[in-house]
């Protein structure tokens, strides 16, 4: 694979292909969707009378995501009156000091419904739900103390639906904690999904760091729990627009007939970040961009975009179709890697008008680091629907804009009855914005009013913020509530995790066996290395600028 020091912003706002990039004679026309939206009346699901145990409750994930999400569920009336939370961590806290710490965490939250505000009346109702057990998660005495505390909590209930365990812990101790939960009797195996009281365990990503390690961790999990008890979480799947992919595709008859190789030229999935590694340098040096973003987030977005219609909107039906897509991705031989991938690492540059250092100058990063902070992959799905359609996935740090989107670029008309001055027409693009401005846009051609036939591009845009006032729920709220009621649709199954690792492992192995000779090869504040533009141009396309 060739690598260069050059860097340049990506080309084209619409994506090229089929003969070159279109250049409009007139500025695109913006059309906003402003019609009133009728919302079907359906009561929201509510959590069951269970105890949620957060293992690693002193960490950043609990403070920034989990506790604000649980409090917002309380404010929305979606928690059972007898729902309780037990935090477990090393810090020598009691119930009251844990409650004070969580109060400050919720108050400082930037999650939806948070933003520095807190409903004091709701907090007075929420705080008594919180309890704390101090102990080391590698010490069996901690689990004995936890059993005693759980039994006391459950004895005070009229009903006890189950126990929900959240592993908010470093991946390195996942296996140890899962074994201790099982062997101690804190989290017994329940062989049937209908069993009561139920036991469920939420495991955070990354789930392993390779196919072999994921298989080993899955083996530990399988010995401890039935598959229906395990909820492998990817917070991207809780985002409104990610869930809306299924609704867009399968609740609208106009899209499905063109959602295939006959009409789609290529698909681009982008997850760009403006931040560097920040305080995660230790983790990132070992993980890199492919383990951090592709194996989980981006491949999940690909699977939802490319999957066949499930027989029903049920957990296993949806996940069956996602796994089929991942298994259909073409394996890549080591000698072909250069035609299917590009890697990069950012150097010094400018973000939002401020100079920033390169990756190798970041604290706790090896000055000769070979860790990629940018990658672009070209994946081919060898099945009836997608044969011959490239799926381009890219993600990078220190890019000009924080954005995640899926862009379906359709083929040009077979004949050019109408054209612009350069003899081309802009391609139609359906863009699904995952974050930060959640929404959907469609780019199409229209005639410019006046004598003669001139065309320009119009963009019809739907925004969640304009239509609904933005998302009122964080992804973690959605996923935690789903786990409470036993809905695993938005969680990853064992075979899905392993299928994703089978896709990315060859890229990681090839890069680790061949050190990069031109790192850094893109400046912070740009859209990646110049070689990435040449990479996508081989298929007659160009990167969108979201």
Image (tube, rainbow, N blue to C red):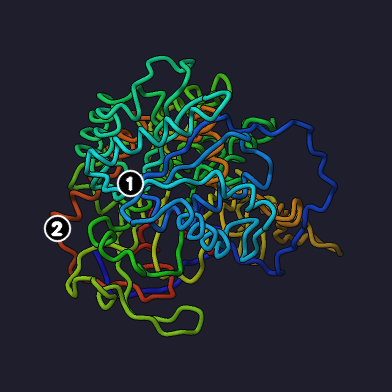
Which of the pair 530/139 is nearer the observer?
139
Which of the pair 515/320 is nearer the observer?
320
Task: Name the quadrant of the N terminus.
Answer: bottom left
Going from N to C along the chain, the mark reached first, 2 or 1, is: 1
Q: Secondary structure at mark 1?
A: loop
Q: Identify the residue under disc 1.
A: 206
Which of the pair 497/540 is nearer the observer?
497
Residue at 45%, 55% (x, y): give it.
98
Snapshot quadrant of residue 182: top left
Q: Identify the residue under disc 2.
A: 514
Residue at 55%, 43% (x, y): give it.
129
Task: Please give left or right for residue 8 compared with residue 225 in the image.
Answer: right
Snapshot quadrant of residue 59: bottom left
Q: Position of residue 285 (x, y in %)?
A: 24, 62
Task: Please give left or right for residue 545 compared with residue 88 in the image.
Answer: right
Which of the pair 197/293 is nearer the observer?
197
Task: Name the quadrant of the C terminus.
Answer: bottom right
Q: Position of residue 101 (x, y in %)?
A: 48, 60
Task: Please give left or right for residue 364 compared with residue 280 in the image.
Answer: left
Q: Is residue 503 visible?
A: yes
Residue at 41%, 43% (x, y): give it.
299
Instruction: Answer above or below: position of 155 versus 146.
Output: above
């Amino acid at each position: 694979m060739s690598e260069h020091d050059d860097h340049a912003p990506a080309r084209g706002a619409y994506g090229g292909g089929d003969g070159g990039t279109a250049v409009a004679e007139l500025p695109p026309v913006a059309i906003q969707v402003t019609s009133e939206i009728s919302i079907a009346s359906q009561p929201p699901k509510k959590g069951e009378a269970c105890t949620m145990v957060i293992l690693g409750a002193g960490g950043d994930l609990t403070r920034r995501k989990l506790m604000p999400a649980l409090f917002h569920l309380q404010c929305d009336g979606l928690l059972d009156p007898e729902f309780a939370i037990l935090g477990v961590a090393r810090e020598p806290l009691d119930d009251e000091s844990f409650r004070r710490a969580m109060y400050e965490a919720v108050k400082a939250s930037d999650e939806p419904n948070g933003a520095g505000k807190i409903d004091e009346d709701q907090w007075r109702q929420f705080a008594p739900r919180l309890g704390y057990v101090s102990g080391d998660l590698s010490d069996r005495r901690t689990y004995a103390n936890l059993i005693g505390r759980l039994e006391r909590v459950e004895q005070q209930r009229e009903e006890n639906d189950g126990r929900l365990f959240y592993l908010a812990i470093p991946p390195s101790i996942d296996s140890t904690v899962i074994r201790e939960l099982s062997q101690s009797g804190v989290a017994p195996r329940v062989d049937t999904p209908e069993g009561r009281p139920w036991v469920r365990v939420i495991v955070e990503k990354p789930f392993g760091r390779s196919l072999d390690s994921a298989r080993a961790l899955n083996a530990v999990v399988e010995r401890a729990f039935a598959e229906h008890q395990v909820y492998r979480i990817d917070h991207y799947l809780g985002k409104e627009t990610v869930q809306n992919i299924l609704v867009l595709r399968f609740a609208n008859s106009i899209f499905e007939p063109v959602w295939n190789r006959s009409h789609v030229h290529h698909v681009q999935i982008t997850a760009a970040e403006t931040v560097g590694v920040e305080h995660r340098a230790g983790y990132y040096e070992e993980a890199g961009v492919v383990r951090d973003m592709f194996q989980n987030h981006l491949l999940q977005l690909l699977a939802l975009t490319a999957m066949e219609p499930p027989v029903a909107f049920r957990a296993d039906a949806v996940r069956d179709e996602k796994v089929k897509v991942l298994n259909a991705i073409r394996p890549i031989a080591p000698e072909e890697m250069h035609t299917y991938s590009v890697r990069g690492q950012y150097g010094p540059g400018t973000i939002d008008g401020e100079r920033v250092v390169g990756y190798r100058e970041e604290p706790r990063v090896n000055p000769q680091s070979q860790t990629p902070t940018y990658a672009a992959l070209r994946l081919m799905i060898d099945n009836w629907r997608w044969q011959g359609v490239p799926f381009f996935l890219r993600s990078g740090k220190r890019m000009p804009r924080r954005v995640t989107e899926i862009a379906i670029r359709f083929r040009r008309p077979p004949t050019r009855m109408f054209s612009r001055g350069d003899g081309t027409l802009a391609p139609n693009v359906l863009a699904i914005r995952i974050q930060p401005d959640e929404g959907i846009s469609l780019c199409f051609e229209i005639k410019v009013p006046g004598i003669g036939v001139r065309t320009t591009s119009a963009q019809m845009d739907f925004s969640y913020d304009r239509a609904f006032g933005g998302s009122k729920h964080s992804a973690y709220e959605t996923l935690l509530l789903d786990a409470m009621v036993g809905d695993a649709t938005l969680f990853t199954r064992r075979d899905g995790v392993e299928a994703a690792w089978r896709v990315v492992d060859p890229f990681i192995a090839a890069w680790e066996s061949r050190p990069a000779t031109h790192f850094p090869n893109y400046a912070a504040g740009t859209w990646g290395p110049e070689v990435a533009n040449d990479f996508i141009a081989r298929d007659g396309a160009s990167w969108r600028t979201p």
